[in-house]
């Protein structure tokens, strides 16, 4: 289909014409001609920026060939400045972003990241704004199963008692009573606009009367009591007839927690979208979210479940007026980066259009259904796009101008489109202040990403020497400086009160007890949001934001801002010799993780799932897993720590283990039955042995090629 000089895949064209455009007020002809102009204006520069990445990498490789690290580290820094890799830092400034929703600007809490092409996950995440604390505790290892408190297949009253005791203790800490404990409450009721409390020891009230926000039901016998602490809401649900409520003195059946304030709907690392068919599914689900109409039917426990998006929540406020609270998480959309193109669109010269440009135009068009409609997502009328994998401020400035052009195309006021900058590439980390400055009028988010950032760290310095083991990276000098530098720059540039400073993922969804013990570290480091792997994890992680006041922590960290450039430039090279056993262990870990994820990506089209590691611990993995694992093996190959034969033998050994881990999946095709014809196995080999040639160590070019190969193979088998 030819539209204004672009060749548009029929499936994409039909989706935009029949589903995306109607209701936006944008005319078809204007859209396609404007879209074509945006592509014509920005695609060449997109290519130039990618070329510059390669030029810089080549110069860095050549420098390492003729210089020795760390003997010439001063010369190294001077060299990076000379080639433009290190930028001259801009003067101090504060961001000026306006019209930011409270979930980003003023509240601190958990953030989910989910593949938007999976409607079930997307709906669950959007609905995770509120979570049952009772359910989250009962179903996880936060509550011990010892002494008769097993989860089992039916309700266990002994376990239930432990859950309720935990929840009441939380209420005592977050919303204390003047006297006694919430465990002693026999009745909650509202009198003269205040929450009154009867306990087994007499009448009392809240220590802070302002913590009471409203109620549902009658004042004498409320069905819900709404409380607030640290800008987060807590909803005590009351029903004396409920199986749990009947056992509670006050009839409390549950404690609901305001949990996932924001969710990133992901088009990128957790998604396998390689052609028009895949991208239309991505866009269609985003459209359903923006319209509030996305639904999904699936079978669970032998029954068909129909899942829809939650409604807002209504209460009677303290003063007797109606009070509305958002029922859903505020949604951001993560577009793809600058690197990849997609055959769904060809430009005037017959070249595939950069996918990041297409995402910017189409996801913003779709978001018009929200900001020009009922504003079920952004009450402030903003569009939130997270932009990953940008290298340095020049690329961030490019995205800023691209968003300007998209706003002009769609008739939007300047800076309606907000940007989240992922700090996950080395050149961005080193120049983060400049990157923030390039989008100072629209930035709402910065975040660190251990896996991608480490993959780029390894690839950038791949010729310098053998890097330390992957598990040691988290204690390395550069990584410690990276996490602190991200917060430093966020505070220095005035993000608090306007934007999120985010922290990374807790990857083990089955180990919530450990998460509860460790993830306070993200708040103590200055993050006002952090990623969690599930709605349940969001409910539990929300408790941390009641324990700690992030605004106060951020204020205290301002005095610790310092220049961390030298530490950031400390390349994580090994200064030791490993035993044969240690080398084998590292190779096993990398190879198993690589294969476990690749096979699902290439042959199942699953970009994010719980993948068992070498110890059978389920880890929530996305594409960044491949980058770090493949680049680590490539680095050790490059410097003779392992041989090609060792790597192949280990891949074959680990393929059998991965096959066994997936044995119960009827759709799974074992790699070890025919290594030569296993598309997934060959993809894993290619990621390693072609690792030095991959742009910035990215895995997308190989994965996309192999996924398309597999889809064509399956289509041919079906037709035959």
Image (cartoon, rainbow, N blue to C red):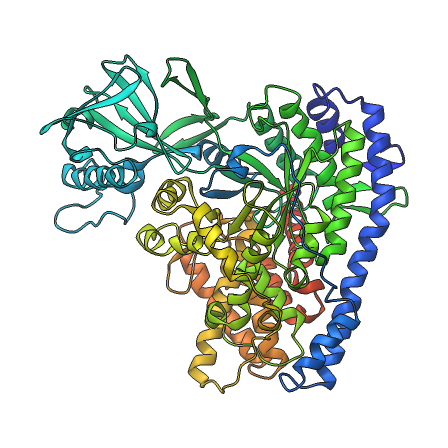
Residue 258 falls in image quadrant? top left
Q: Is residue 661 above or below residue 690?
A: above
Task: In this rendered view, identify the residue nearer to me: 202 or 379.
Answer: 202
Residue 676 seen in render: no
Q: Position of residue 6 (x, y in %)?
A: 86, 37
Residue 63 falls in image quadrant? bottom right
The N terminus appears in which quarter of the rendering?
top right
Residue 376 falls in image quadrant? top right
9 relative position to 460: left or right = right
Figure label count: 0
529 relative position to 100: left or right = left
- For the point 78% across and 67% down, the residue is 84
The C terminus appears in which quarter of the rendering?
top right
Q: Is residue 683 above or below residue 178?
A: below
Q: Position of residue 172 (x, y in %)?
A: 23, 38
Q: Position of residue 142 (x, y in %)?
A: 27, 48
Task: In this rendered view, identify the residue nearer to me: 387 or 183.
Answer: 183
Q: Residue furthest left?
A: 201
Task: In this rendered view, identify the residue nearer to me: 505 or 600.
Answer: 505
Residue 391 seen in render: yes
- For the point 80% across and 32% down, the residue is 408
Q: Is residue 487 above or below residue 401?
A: below
509 relative position to 118: left or right = left
710 relative position to 536: left or right = right
Q: Position of residue 195 (x, y in %)?
A: 26, 22
């Amino acid at each position: 289909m030819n539209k204004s000089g672009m060749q548009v895949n029929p499936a994409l064209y039909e989706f935009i014409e029949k589903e995306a455009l109607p209701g936006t007020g944008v005319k078809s002809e204007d859209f396609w001609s404007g879209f074509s102009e945006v592509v014509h204006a920005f695609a060449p520069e997109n290519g130039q920026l990618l070329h510059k990445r390669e030029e810089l990498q080549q110069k860095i490789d050549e420098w390492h060939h003729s210089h020795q690290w760390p003997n010439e580290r001063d010369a190294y820094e001077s060299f990076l400045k000379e080639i433009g890799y290190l930028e001259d830092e801009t003067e101090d400034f504060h961001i000026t972003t306006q019209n930011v929703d409270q979930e980003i600007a003023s509240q601190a809490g958990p953030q989910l990241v989910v593949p938007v092409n999976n409607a079930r996950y997307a709906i669950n995440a959007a609905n995770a704004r509120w979570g049952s604390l009772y359910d989250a505790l009962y179903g996880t290892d936060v509550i011990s199963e010892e002494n008769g408190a097993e989860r089992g297949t039916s309700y266990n009253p002994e376990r239930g008692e432990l859950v309720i005791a935990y929840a009441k203790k939380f209420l005592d800490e977050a919303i204390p009573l003047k006297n006694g404990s919430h465990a002693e409450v026999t009745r909650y009721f509202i009198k003269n606009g205040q929450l009154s409390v009867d306990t087994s020891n007499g009448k009392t009230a809240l220590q802070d009367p302002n913590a009471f926000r409203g109620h549902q039901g009658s004042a004498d016998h409320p069905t819900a009591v709404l409380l607030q602490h640290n800008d987060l809401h807590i909803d005590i649900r009351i029903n004396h007839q409920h199986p749990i409520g009947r056992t509670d003195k006050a009839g409390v059946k549950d404690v609901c927690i305001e949990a996932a304030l924001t969710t990133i709907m992901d088009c990128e690392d957790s998604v396998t979208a390689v052609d028009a068919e895949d991208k239309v599914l991505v866009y269609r689900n985003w459209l359903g979210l923006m319209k509030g109409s996305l639904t999904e039917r699936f079978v669970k426990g032998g029954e068909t479940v129909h899942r829809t998006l939650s409604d807002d929540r209504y209460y009677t406020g303290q003063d007797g007026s109606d009070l509305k609270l958002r029922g859903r998480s505020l949604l951001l959309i993560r577009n793809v980066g600058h690197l990849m193109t997609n055959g769904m669109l060809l430009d005037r010269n017959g070249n595939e259009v950069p996918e990041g440009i297409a995402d910017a135009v189409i996801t913003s068009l779709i978001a018009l259904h929200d900001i020009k409609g009922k504003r079920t997502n952004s009450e402030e009328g903003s569009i939130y796009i997270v932009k990953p994998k940008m290298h340095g401020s020049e690329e961030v400035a490019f995205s800023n101008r691209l968003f300007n052009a998209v706003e002009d195309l769609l008739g939007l006021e300047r800076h309606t489109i907000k940007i989240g900058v992922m700090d996950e590439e080395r050149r961005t980390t080193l120049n983060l202040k400049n990157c923030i400055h390039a989008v100072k009028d629209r930035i709402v988010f910065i975040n660190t990403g251990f896996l991608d950032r480490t993959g780029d760290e390894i690839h950038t310095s791949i010729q310098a020497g053998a890097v330390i083991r992957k598990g040691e990276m988290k204690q390395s000098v550069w990584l410690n400086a990276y996490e602190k530098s991200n917060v430093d720059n966020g505070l220095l540039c005035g993000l608090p009160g306007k934007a999120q400073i985010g922290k990374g993922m807790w990857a083990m969804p089955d180990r919530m007890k450990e998460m509860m013990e460790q993830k306070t570290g993200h708040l103590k480091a200055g993050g006002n949001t952090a990623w969690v792997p599930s709605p349940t994890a969001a409910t539990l992680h929300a408790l941390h934001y009641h324990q700690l006041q992030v605004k106060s922590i951020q204020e205290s960290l301002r005095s610790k801002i310092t220049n961390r450039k030298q530490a950031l430039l400390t390349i994580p090279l090994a200064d030791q010799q490993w035993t044969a056993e240690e080398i084998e262990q590292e190779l096993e870990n990398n190879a198993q993780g690589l294969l476990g994820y690749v096979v699902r990506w290439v042959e199942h089209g699953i970009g994010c799932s719980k993948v068992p590691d070498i110890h059978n611990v389920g880890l929530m993995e996305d594409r960044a897993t491949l980058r770090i694992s493949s680049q680590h093996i490539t680095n050790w190959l490059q410097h003779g720590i392992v041989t090609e034969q060792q790597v192949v033998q280990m891949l074959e050994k680990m393929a059998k283990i991965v096959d066994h881990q997936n044995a119960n999946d009827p759709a799974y095709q074992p790699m070890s039955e025919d290594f030569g014809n296993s598309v997934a196995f060959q993809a894993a080999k290619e990621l390693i042995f072609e690792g030095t040639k991959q742009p910035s160590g990215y895995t997308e070019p190989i994965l996309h090629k192999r996924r398309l190969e597999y889809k064509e193979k399956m289509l041919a088998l079906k037709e035959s």
